[in-house]
Image: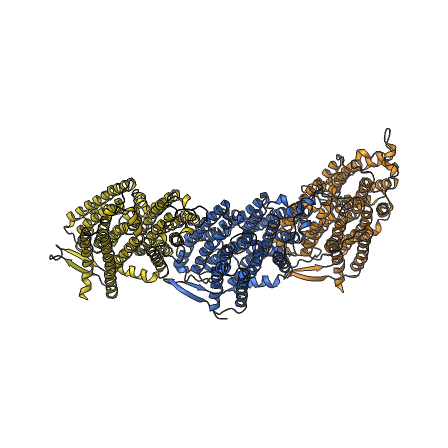
Amino acid sequence: MEMILNFPCLCILLTMFSAIISSALNRRWARYLNTFVVTLVGILSAAVLMFTLTSGKSYVYQMGHFPAPFGNEIRFGSLEAGMALFFSVIMLLSLNGGREKIRMEIDPGKEKLYYIMINLLLSSLLALVYTNDIFTAYVFVEINTISACGMIVITEHGRTIEAATRYMIMSLLGSGLFLIGICILYDMTGHLLMEYLYTSISNIMAAGTYRIPMMVAIALIVVGLAIKSALFPFHAWLPDAYGYSTVSSAAMLSSLVSKGYIFLLIKLIYRVIGFEVFFGSRIINVLFVFGLAGMIMGSVSAIRENDIRRMISYSSVAQIGYIYMGFGLGTGAGMVASVFHILSHGATKSLLFVAAVGLTDASGGHKEFDELTGAAYRNRLAGAAFLVGALSMVGIPLFSGFISKLLFAQAAVQSQGKALAALVVLAVSTVLNAIYFMKTVIRIYTPTDKKYEVTAFGYKVSYAITLGCFILLNLLLGLFSQPITNWITQGLTILQ
Amino acid sequence: MNHILLFPIVFPILAGIMLLTVIKYQNRKPLLAYVGTVLGVNALWGLFAMFRVSEGVTVFYLTKSLPIYLKVDTVGRLFASLMVLVWLLGGLFSFEYMKHEKNEQRFYGFYLILYGVLFGLDFSGNLITLYLFYEFMTLTALPLVLHTQTKEAVMAGLKYLFYSFAGAYMALFGVFFIGRYAKTLEFTPGGVIDPSVFRENETLFFVVAMLMILGFSVKAGMFPMHAWLTAAHPAAPGPASAVLSGIIVKGGILALIRVVYEIIGVDFLRGSWVQQWWMILSLLTVFLGSLLAFREPVLKKRLAYSTVSQLSYILFGLSLFEVQAMTGSLLHIIAHVFIKVALFFTAAAIIYMTGCKRVEELRGVAKGMPVTMWCYTIVSLGLIGIPPTSGFISKWYLAEGALHTGIPVFSWLGPVILLLSALLTAGYLLPLSMRGFFPGEGYDAGRFAGKEPPLSMRVPLLIFAGLTLGIGLFPNVFTNILSAAADFLM
Amino acid sequence: MSRLWLCFVVVFPMLAGLFAPLVYRKKQEFFRAYLGISVLLNSVLVWLLLFHRPEAGITLFYFTGNLTIAFELDGLGCVFAGLVSFLWPLATLYSFEYMAKEEHEDIFFLFYTMTYGVTLGIALADNFLTMYCFYELLTLVTVPLVMHTLTREAILASRKYLCYSIGGAAFAFIGMIFIILYGSTTDFVLGGVLEPGKIGGKENILLLVYIFTFLGFGVKAAICPFNSWLPQAGVAPTPVTALLHAVAVVKSGAFAAMRVTYYSFGTEFLRGSFAQHFLMVIVMFTILYGCSMALKETHLKRRLAYSTISNLSYILFGVVIMTPLGLGAALTHMVCHAFMKICSFFCAGAIMHQTGRHYIHELDGFARRMPRVFAIFTVSAVALMGAPGLCGFISKWNLAAAAIDSGNVLAWFGIGCLLASALLTAMYMLTIVVRGYFPGEGFDYDSIADVKDPNFRMLLPLLIFAAAMFLLGIHSQPFVDLFMRVAQGSF
């Protein structure tokens, strides 16, 4: 079983090397390598997951020759392994679903660059998931940002360049704040490894000294990561970035990139700052309020959109609001709900983007709603998939969105004082979601006589398989959520 | 054995339904024969049933606590006998009158159905049966109002319908509460509610009583819900107006008697604000009705206002809760039926024979229609209250009863208003007679020549006039029976 | 009977509906027979189940935690399931005739039959979660029916319906969460499942949540101010408006309200609270609002839709009285009104189908040309008014008796509302009847020479409904007894 302990490190290294090697390959081979690597990472992560589930412990793995507290470490438990598996599955499916589009929209010369970016993205995500060192986390946060930007700008036209620039600016702002926070922490504690940080911080909090700098540091870290994960009101870059990039990028950005930062935040809360300190501070109230605001404002903006991709993007803002609301509730149940929503949203949002591209292609490439009337009849599978995604977003039982709602609501009721606000906003948000998603569903299912030039796109087998897998994933999360919730709860307890 | 009470109710209803749906007569003669036979047979059977059967019979249970129960008592016999007489004579009158209207078969169909429903109303033994037949009476009388299908008639019919239902539902509100608190829904003189229950929920029961009184008074055209009457009665064809003003409105009065005397009980209401308001409203209506009749140029509408006023005489008498006043009321019911039906028949005969509807057009009419106008004059005197007519006797009893009660203000105010109203009555009824008999200069002599209506129209008029005089001359027979009934009810 | 039949009667119509377009494509002649037999078979099975009730429920699967999808047939479910199953075959027969003139029959009957299964799912739901799931599903399967004619109005109406319904369910969801956390179980138990120990000092929050839940489910039952979807949904074909929006969908809303009040939160907890008073006021307002709007409305089907809004609040009035008598009265009106309203809608549909006339002023003199339809319409109008001898009186009587018995003075005003509403009902229903029979002097009957009675497929259901209204009016005792026993919990 020793072998398995090496897997996480192996995964990270594998992806990084794959990125380097891809620069020398031509585009077809770059794609094959990429697919191979992602699949392999998935399998390895699954193995680690099995292993950690049965043993129930979390393992520390030393990177390099220096032992703690001076060296670098990786740490993994069942939750991290599961997240890694999830990320690789979503990445695989997103790439598959958008494969034709990659071929169509990206310059042939640049295509392998795209795969390099993907590999870097996966490596940084894995690193964020596994790392136990706060500065390493920062480094990979930056790598993440760069690869995300690369993914947006790879389809070169005015909109994407503008989107990427905006993203870059906001993101770097977030990273900057994060870095300052880390520096302050390092200053005060002298440690970079998470466990040691935790001990130091608890001592400092107990002693009562450095209270204000500590709060400032925590605030900077949290706000920095919140900016990067598009919490309201720092979401302005999101609709452009998701709306105009190629569909695989959009899917991966919405499901993976922001979730990577959120997962890092969770790790920091449990392992560095400490549960009680975090929940005792006022930060969670701020997160709660912004989360609620995001839930409403995201949906309101979505209602006003006329472009289907941008509508789905604004919906992401609302969903990220859900996650931060979960943080803001200040209970363990709230964190479980948030983690579940990471999974649920990841699966659903990618599904929606991939389905949307099928619908727009069946309507002559138009993205406005007027042109999308009856699109579901032109591409039946994409229409059905979009329907599934929409129902999940609204929270219809049988789909994953319902379980998310259920978990959030139950967590809300158990928290003091915030219950009613959270529940009412949850209900209002459902209504708002219903308004724009159901309107779209009705529109795509309204038959029309207009003819569009339909590319054979939608009927490619790989596309169909991708959508099928997404739908299955959604149903899996919706119907068999009990084991998953158990895994999350167990994972969170050993996260610390 | 007691189930023979059902026959007079069911037989004409079925006969009427058949006439409306299945049977189609091409000629008038078989139609008239059919109607006449049904009317006659049912009258005989009805009279037989009501005088032979003395116990009640439960027909079926609408729900476990709501039996449909028939029982004949003195009041019921009174109303039923009046109704039978009017219906027979009205039928006779219609045979001639309906010659110049269309859709005759439809008219007779509903006339027969209404006949049966009214038997049901008069034979009702408990509150829910009364309510059931009351609602059906409203519904089945509607087509009679609407008969001519003119815009005016349809508007009048709808007005009648909605006012009637408003009243019925006000009363139903009370029925709900009575159903809950009373021991039984059967009509029992003195009331069916335990005095202790009354005392606990006094305000509630007063409100309930007031609502029921107002509700049923709608049918009797008491202010402020009288507007339907003056629209509906003129709009209906002649014989229908007569039975509407004569009998249908008495349905409301019957319901009031039953509810006030035999459900709620007079002892509870005596001296309360309910009684006061009832007296106020009825006196107001007496005066207002006469005043408006006085100013009305259209003959039938004038008679309708008169009905409004006269019915409130009866209501006033009922509101006094005193034996003599009650006797007066019951007597006035009889008197008014005969008088009002005769008056409307006169109006109908005039319209039928001459087509004139307004009073000013009728100068010298008595020259051409002497019998008609003599009967008119006699019954008019009766309505005004001049001896020796029935109207005089009833007004006498009413006034005496009022004075007897000793209720402050009302005991003298009542008779005063009755007197004023009598003067106004003279003012609105007699001009027709006077101008008819003594037209003065410059009238069209040939206009009304030879316009005496045929026998089938004259006979009912003569009978009613005769009865009016007869009751006036030999009142004791009636007053004894009615006094006994009034006594029994208290 | 075995418990598996509970599952079967819910799933079978859904599957039958799913396969309907296939049958249509392969063998069109058998299409109607296929549908008729499936629906009839299912109804027979349901009635067999009512008489041989399985002892316990059946759990289909476990959702998460201790939440399950389970079916059971208790007294309340019996009444609703029995009602729905009795009406569906008749409505299907009527629809065959009606849809013969419309397009896309196969898609229509797909969703129509699926709705049958889903409605039974609501009736047979053993716990809150099951009912909630099927409730959401009901919205989804009925939207295509509303949208069927695909005109702009239909699409707007379906959008409104969808958003209102999902919104309502979202607020009812809050109630479900609270029951999960504060109740001993999510099952439906007469008397409620809230545990006093768990409630602690949180009564007011729970009452507020109850109001949300009631109003949330009330959206489907067209409570003010969330009822504007119902008249607009009148644009759907008449079989849809009649069965769904007078029987299945709206009664599901009322049924859910009953479950929440009597079987989840429990009347002991709710009676006398501000929640009860607040809801009673809203219900009374809706009763009057529906009637007043009906009076102003000149489009025949929309008038009947407003009448439905008002009558549904009669049922809700019985529910918020919060006594066993109240529940029994509410059930009585649920059944009686279903018959009266479906009859009126079917008559209206027959008129629209035969003549294409939609507005009331176009119906003058029709009674002579369509005597049977008009006669039955008159019967349903008199029944809706509440004349004794027909079923409307019985349910009004029971509602009033329950209100008086409860001793709640606000409820007494409610009786006044009921009666005012009865008067308004008389006005807006009888004017149609009067105009039909007495169209005014000099009416030219030749102008409506094309009008005639429909054939037996439409007339037979109408006759059955008219007979039912009489039967329920005269011989209501066994039914009312049954409903009262259900309300007491002894059925």
Instruction: Give whichever of B364, B123 is nearer the camera.
Output: B364
Q: Chain A is drawn in which colour?
A: yellow
Q: Is residue B162 left or right of residue C234?
A: right
Residue B242 at x, y = what percent? 77, 45
| Image x and y of residue A402, in percent | 38, 55
Q: Residue furthest left?
A: A65
Measured as percent of width and height from the top left, residue B469 is found at 86, 45
Q: Which of B261 and A442 is in front in this view?
A: A442
Q: Which residue is drawn at 18% across and 61% down?
A: A6
Does residue C182 appear left or right of residue A34 in this picture?
right
Report whether residue A271 is seen.
yes
Instruction: Work out which residue is located at the far bottom of the displayed protein and give it.
Output: C1
Q: Which colour scheme is used?
A: by chain
- The chain letter of the blue chain reads C
Position of C98 compared to B479: left or right?
A: left
Residue lying at 40% horizontally and 64% vertically, measured from the top left: C61
